Structure formats: C-alpha cells, structure tokens
Image: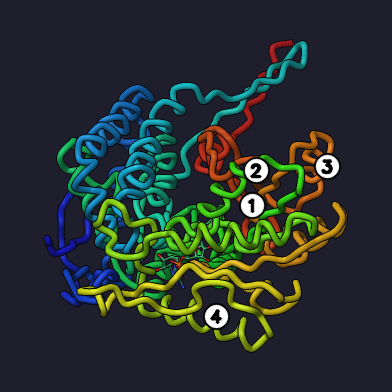
Amino acid sequence: MSTILNYINGQMVPAKSQETLDIINPSNGKKYTTAPSSDSNDVDEAVKAAQTAFPLWSALSIDERSRYLIKIADRIEEKLDSLAIAESIDNGKPVSLARKVDIPRGAANFRFFGNAITQFASESHDMGTAINYTLRQPLGIVGCISPWNLPLYLFSWKIAPALAAGNTVIAKPSEVTPMTAFLLSEICIEIGLPPGVLNIIHGLGDRVGGPITSHPKIKAISFTGSTRVGGTIAKIAAPMFKKLSLEMGGKNPNIIFADCDYDKMLSTTVRSSFANQGQICLCGSRIYVERSLYEKFKTDFVAKTKALKVGDPLSPDTKVGATVSKVHYDKVLSYIDIAKSEGGKILCGGTAIFPEGLEDGLYIAPTIIDGLPNDCRTNQEEIFGPVVTIMPFDTDSEALQLANGTEYGLSATVWTNNLNRAHRMAKDLEAGIVWVNTWLMRDLRTPFGGVKSSGVGREGGFDALKFFTEQKNVCIDFG
Ligand code: NAD
C-alpha cells in the first residue's frame, strides 16, 4: 500500500515536520501504511496555495469548473473496484457496501454538483422603476472537515459543492481513514485540476482541524463529525464570524406501527440498524414498536440479526465488518456494559467476535437490547456501533414523545400504512430528515441536516451551493 501524502499546491508532499501517523487495518488490527501528521505549518502552506489559485479558479466559466468535477466523477467510477477495496481495508466496512454505496456515491457527489452549478441561479426583485438582482459569489478559501464512517462519500459531499461554487478548498479527512482522500488527490492530479484549487491535509483533529478552523483567511467551515467537536469548532469560528455548517451526532428513532408492511419493514430495519456496523449517522438506534407487534417483531428481528455474517470485510458475503478503530471498538463495548448495568437484557450479540485468522480484528456482534427506559444513557447517548435498543409503545403520541425525547434530531424512520398517521408523525418529529416506509433513500437535491444537537445548516442540492457562496444585492434605479 502506498504511503499517504498531503496534497498541497498540486504536489504530493509529506508533513513539513516529517512526522507520520500509523494507519491501521481494523479487519486484522495491523498497521498497513502511514499518513502525514501535519500541523499549522502545512495548513499555512495550503492556504497560500489556495489563495494564489482562487482568482483563476473563481474566474473560470461555470462550464469549465463543471467539466473538472465531471472528470473527477468519471475517474472515480473507472477506479471503482480499487477504491472500494481501499475503503474497505481502511475502514473495516464490507467491500460489497463500499462498492455499492461509498464509491458510487463519491462519484455521484462530484457529478451532481458539477451539473447543479450549471443550473444554479439567483433572484431578482422588480420595483417598477428600479430592479434588484442578487449576485452569488464564492467565499474564497473554505475548510472542509469530515469523519471516518463514510470516508470518500462525506469528504466529496463537501468538497464538490465548495469547488463548484468557485471556492478553493483546504480539506481534512479523518486521521482514522485517510486512504481514499489520498487516492482522490491522485485523481485530481491525473485529471489536471489546477494546483492549489483543492488541498488535502492529513493529521489529527486538534493539529490540523484546529488551525483550519482558526485560520483568518479561511472564510467558512463545513464540518461533519461528533457533536462534541462541532461545539469546539463553533466556539472558535463563530466569534470570527465564519460561515458554519455543522453536521453532527444522532440517536435516530425507528418507529414501527402494527399496520406497516411487515416484511419490508423487517429487512429494512436490519439494514438501518447494522449497515456499516451501525456506523452511519442515519442508522436507527432506538427502535420503538407498537405493543401488539412487539413480541413477533422481537423474535423475527433477533433471528434475522443472528443470521448476519460478521467477518472479513473483503469477503463478498460479509454483511457486518470490523468497527473502525480500537478506540471506537472499546467505546461501543463499554456501552454494552453500561446497558447491562442499566438493566438491559441482551437479546443477541453483546460481545466481541474473533473470526478465525482475524483474531486481532475489531469485530462486535450485532447487538439488540430490550428492557431499558427511554431516559437511560444507552438510549440518550450516541453509541454509533452495531447496537440497538427496542422498546414497546401504545399510542401515537407516546411514540412521538419517546422519539423526540433526546437532545439529537438528525433523522427518523416511520413504518405505517396509515396515511394520516404518516403525515402527522412526519410533521411532529424533531428531525431534519424523516423517512416513511423506507430508509436511506436519498435524492441529492434535498436538504440534508439535523436539528437540536445534530446540526446547524443544511447540505445538499442548492442549499450547499448557497452555503458556499455569499449573496450581494445590487439595486439599480432607472426611474
Ligand atoms: P469527530 O468529531 O471525532 O471527528 C470528525 C473530524 O473532525 C475528523 O476529521 C477529526 O480529525 C476532526 N477534528 C477532531 N477534533 C477537531 C478539532 N478540535 N478541530 C477541528 N477538527 C477536529 O467524529 P468522528 O469520530 O470522526 O465521526 C463520528 C461522528 O460523526 C459521529 O458522532 C457521527 O454521528 C457523526 N456523523 C454525522 C453525520 C451527519 O451528517 N450529521 C454524518 C456522519 C457522521
């Protein structure tokens, strides 16, 4: 595996300090490469390059910028297989998932925003004898900071609209999963992206993310990650009056009514609970089931979950791979202990797994817990692993109260065939995204983000292009 390097001013370079971080393959617990452990000196270098590149990049025609993004999308698609394997090794996710979701979606993000910018228009307001029109201009240099759970997918979800809108970018992938961001820099060189337009800096959160957040020349921060780090970023960036988009943690409810389409609900709920080892911000981790269906659901859900194949992420029939890092693995296992101490009953899973030949890998059996109240830590705090709780409810209003009863509000899923109930629940759920009778169905034009402690601002579609531009109203009096 190649040694990972920073991508600054069109060049692949090590950290100025020459320091590196070990990058671990979570499927076997072994170091497989290194990445630069950068610091503020590398960020400064990247900002200089981005500053030099900005006048040229922002002055390109929309069609020219669009073409660069589409070329990146094409190249990602050409490299689908190798990128999927790289993502799986780096993150521990099943290669089948990376091939079907992560990498195609990385390409789709570049293609979508490459096309969306050609359709992005601004408003005008006619006053009779005067006209107002609104210019939407790029911000300048922007910072994009992303997490480890969907590495290329979420990295590209920020970079693509930022570039499309005419900004130059300083981007930081998670230090836990840097590989596909590095491979993206190779792609940018291959397609001839002008130097300095995109700069990718690897390293730790406080040593790289911190200097990006506080750099006076970086005008906006688009962050996806934990609520804790989002708060730290806001404390630094808000007094500097930077634009901020924060996509943060979740504790998403999955509400199942007895009148739902049972088979579709059951198979989707297995997916929404354990896909990517439960490490998708949109996974439903609190499952509320109407009491009349509770026992049947419990039996079937446990049986289907026990049948999931846990093991080598590179094996094509693996459904649940390794959790991403030792720190995270320990955190998830500690929450299973917390659940037990709170009186939870482990219906399946509840332990680490040691597949033959991969005994040092970070595997956790998909875990279902019942018997816990809504206000316990297990049901209030984000675990972000293959652990879900199930709880019965009796009425619509009780379901709503339970679902809304956390500090988070990213997404919610409702299963019912009652049209009125579906609309009522969708309206009253405190979440940025509600799915009815489906999960993770995404149209990239729609607003994406959370409420309460899950987020500030919206990504996706024109919302992302609006975030990455500044409006200027021009009023012309011709009376
Ligand atoms: P994290 O907050 O620990 O790290 C996210 C990124 O921030 C990483 O690149 C990290 O290096 C960087 N960072 C850390 N400290 C920083 C600092 N002081 N200043 C600037 N940057 C810093 O999150 P994680 O563990 O990588 O990812 C898991 C979290 O992400 C979960 O909470 C999950 O819910 C959330 N997430 C949210 C969404 C969403 O769309 N709302 C999507 C995916 C993941």
Distance in Å between CA atoms under marks 1 and 3: 16 Å
Q: 206 or 359, which is in the foreground? A: 359
The residue labelled by disc 4 is 336
- Secondary element under disc 3, as helix, strand or loop, is helix
Q: Is the residue indicated by label 4 positioned so its CB lies within 8 Å of ligand 1? A: no
Instruction: Give the quadrant of the C terminus.
Output: top right
Determine the residue positioned at 68% across, 57% down.
296
Which numbered mark, 1 or 4, is in the foreground of this view? 4
Q: Residue furthest left?
A: 2
Disc 1 target residue: 411
Q: Looking at the image, is mark 1 or mark 2 earlier in the sequence?
A: 1
| Gap between marks 2 and 3 measured at Cα | 13 Å
Q: Do the residues labelled 1 and 4 touch (CB within 8 Å)?
A: no
Q: How crowded is mark 2: few (under 14 residues within 10 Å), some or many (20 or more)?
A: some
Camera sees residue 18: yes
Q: Dot 2 corresponds to which residue?
A: 435
Q: How crowded is mark 1: few (under 14 residues within 10 Å), some or many (20 or more)?
A: many
Q: Which amino acid does label 1 sit on?
A: Ser
Spatial CA distance of label 1 from label 4 is 23 Å
Q: Which comes before the other along the chain, label 2 or label 3?
A: 3
Q: Which of 330 and 318 is in front in this view?
A: 318
